[in-house]
Amino acid sequence: MKIPFIDLKARHDQIRPEIDAAIARVLDHGQFIMGPEVAQLEEELCKFVGSKHCISMSNGTDALVAALMALGVGVGDAVITTPFTFFATVEAIMILGATPVFADIDPATFNICPNEVEKAIKRVRQENDLNLKGIIPVDLYGLCADYQSLNKLAQENGLFVLQDSAQAFGATTPDGKRAPTHGDIGTASFFPAKPLGCYGDGGACFTDNDKLASLLRSIRVHGKGTDKYDNVRVGQNCRLDTLQAAILLEKLKVYSEDFGLRQKVAGKYDQLFSAFPDLQVSAPVIPSGFHSAWAQYTIRHPDRDSLAVDLKTQGIPTAVYYRTPVNLSGAVSEISEEPFACPVSEQYSKQVLSLPFSPSLVGSSFQIVAEAIKRLAKF
Ligand SMILES: *Cc1c(COP(=O)(O)O)cnc(C)c1O
């Protein structure tokens, strides 16, 4: 049996008839852009996460760009974010001509550290003529950032919070809130490999703010006013396809079950590693009362690359998220005058390794991964 890094096929095979029927319904009605499934999906997604508004988008990156546009970010503005993320988070800031400012991560959770954010706010306000507008925390690997502290900081400093929850749709915090409803706007990605994935590109913005919601609906369709030929602002074309919405409606029906299975698989990994302390493996701390959406199960190891080779030799695929912290990426070093020091992110990028993870990684397939890891422990 071959273990895939992410097994999308297992779930697909189970709900194939429902997906086929959903696709057929769209082919029958032919409303491929903004068909009825788009509004239906937005309503269901709102119900699931407990948000007032959902504005579906073409992908998670466009959702971030549209959100920043709605929040009024542009040239001369600065936005604080984490360097330990997928490039899209930072790219969205830079596409609009704004400047990213990096705050290092918390060594325990791997998410942006509120103390570092506080320092970054002071630094920008003292040294820079940039207009600091907001913070984009990222819910890395599926775990919500510390929104209690981050929202407080944002409020005290007149900043927005834009939650990049591309990896954490539905993740929960102790107050019972579900991602991405923790900030002024939250974004999701429905890229196939994300916890809630469609069969192409997809994304969404969530907000409780009526004004931001109506701005986002306008930005999504070329800055439309009364219709798409009444252009009252510059927007973009970032609509979700009706076909993807129809597929997501079916995937959402089984998402709660998948979410539970993800907790189980993560628990099995935790158990396995705690049995082999000699392996020197550590994983992000999930603070009490938080539930990660487990986009990835990621460990840290002092000799990450050898561990990856040893697992590959035994047929176990792994991946590295992320090998280069974004503050050190070519695209960013080009614009920033001084390199940002983010020592934790820089150290962790050399140590992290994500292991095979899928809701279906149970029973005999988990056993294969477990045996491979046990063999390493015996070296
Ligand atoms: C995947 C991802 C995105 C981008 O989502 P797409 O749908 O691929 O555009 C943004 N931020 C983070 C943290 C991601 O993991």
Image (cartoon, rainbow, N blue to C red):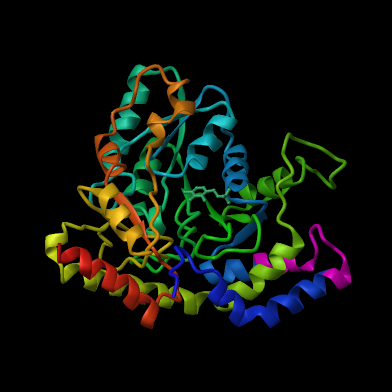
Residue at position x 80%, y 43% from top? 225
What x and y, as percent, mark residue 306? 26, 50
Q: Quadrant of the C terminus?
A: bottom left
* As drawn, 139 above or below 126: below
Q: Is residue 362 visible?
A: no
The kind of secondary structure the magenta stretch mainly shows is: helix
Q: Is residue 197 visible?
A: yes
Residue at position x 59%, y 34% from top? 72
* Residue sitting nearer the eye, 46 or 38: 38
* Residue sitting nearer the eye, 57 or 175: 57
* Residue sitting nearer the eye, 374 or 185: 374
Residue at position x 64%, y 55% from top? 201
Q: Does the magenta segment cover residue 202?
A: no
Res 32 → quadrant: bottom right
What x and y, as percent, mark residue 152? 35, 47
Start-end of magenta stretch:
27-42
Q: How many marks?
A: 0
What x and y, as percent, mark residue 44? 63, 71
Q: Quadrant of the N terminus?
A: bottom left
* As drawn, 105 above or below 341: below
Image check: 142 left or right of 371? right
Most extreme residue toward the left, as rendered? 278
